[in-house]
Image (spheres, helix red, strand yellow):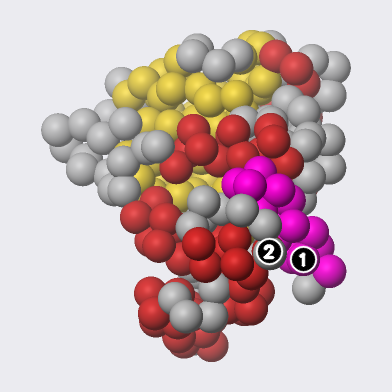
Amino acid sequence: MEIFRLPALTDNYIFLLHDPASQTAAVVDPAQPEPVLRQLEQLGATLTAIFNTHHHADHVGGNRRLLQQFPEATVYGGAEDRGRIPGQQVFLREGDTVTFAQRRAQVYFVPGHTRAHIAYYFPPNEAQGWGELFCGDTLFAGGCGRLFEGTPSQMVDSLSKLRSLPDTTRIWCAHEYTLNNLKFALTVDADNHDLHARFNEVKTARQQGEATVPSTLGSEKLTNPFLRWDQPALQTAANITDPVRTFARIRGMKDQF
């Protein structure tokens, strides 16, 4: 399974999954149709699936146009998003699976950013040592999504599920927010040497116009404050010892950053 990262809008990423053996493709969160159609034409591939993580327009904006071009494609999304995702045909819940390129992805219900958010995780196989996590706006490189429809407790539960995956999981998040996320992280985790090193790497990458997605879960566990709510340094920064309240305080600080 090949993965193509397609820039869209201001700072979105669309992910096109390609199966060279069958010349079929799937797309994750098509913000716009044009980048997807260009990549499909370049590959000579047929779109068979649209995997949506949640209903926001910058994740489903391309659905209708893509279905016009590929009416046989199946649109997947969370069961709680019924009526909110254009063209949705499959309504997924925690524990369901989807298959593409002979790889089976596990579906995680990860509310917080929205009440219906899901993520898709392809475990590693013999040919590919990386696991692939498509997490929409739940987990970002160096950050996490705003809480528009969910609660801090829900988001901590959701991030705990993702944090439990192997360190060798690649994080295909939907926005290029990494540099700003790490700037904030330094304000609440200033003594974290791994974070300082990562910030310098990301700063250089962005100066050179390079993408910082995908990240890896191993790196996120060391440097992302929104996966470190149970660490003393973050609890000290929040002036709270309760993990959920620590997360909520830090998320509130980030909202004002």
Q: Which sits in the foreground, 146 or 173?
A: 146
- Mark 2 touches mark 1? (CB < 8 Å): yes
Residue 54 coordinates in the image, percent (x, y)? 71, 33
Q: Which part of the image, by quadrant, shows the N terminus? A: top left
Q: Confirm whether the magenta stretch covers residue 250.
A: yes
What secondary structure is the magenta-colored segment mainly?
helix
Q: How crowded is mark 2: few (under 14 residues within 10 Å), some or many (20 or more)?
A: many
Q: Is residue 252 visible?
A: yes
> According to the image, label 1 marks what residue?
253
From the viewer's perspective, tell me whether residue 193 is left or right of residue 74.
left
In the picture shown, does residue 55 fall above or below 185? above
Q: Name the element at disc 2.
A: helix
Up/down of 175 relative to 185, above or below: above
The amino acid type of the residue labelled 1 equals Met
Q: Is residue 43 left or right of residue 108?
A: left
Q: Which residue is drawn at 37% across and 37% down?
A: 165
Instruction: Name which residue type carries label 2.
Output: Ala
Residue shown at 31% from the left, 21% from the top = 102
Q: Position of residue 212 (x, y in %)?
A: 48, 67
In the rendered image, residue 215 lying in the magenta stretch gets the answer no
Q: Nearer the viewer, residue 191 or 37?
A: 191
**Is 245 situated left or right of 148 in this image?**
left
Q: Give the range drawn in magenta.
A: 242-256
Q: How far is mark 2 from mark 1, CA to CA?
A: 9 Å
Judge whether residue 176 can be spotted in this image: no
Residue receiving disc 2: 238
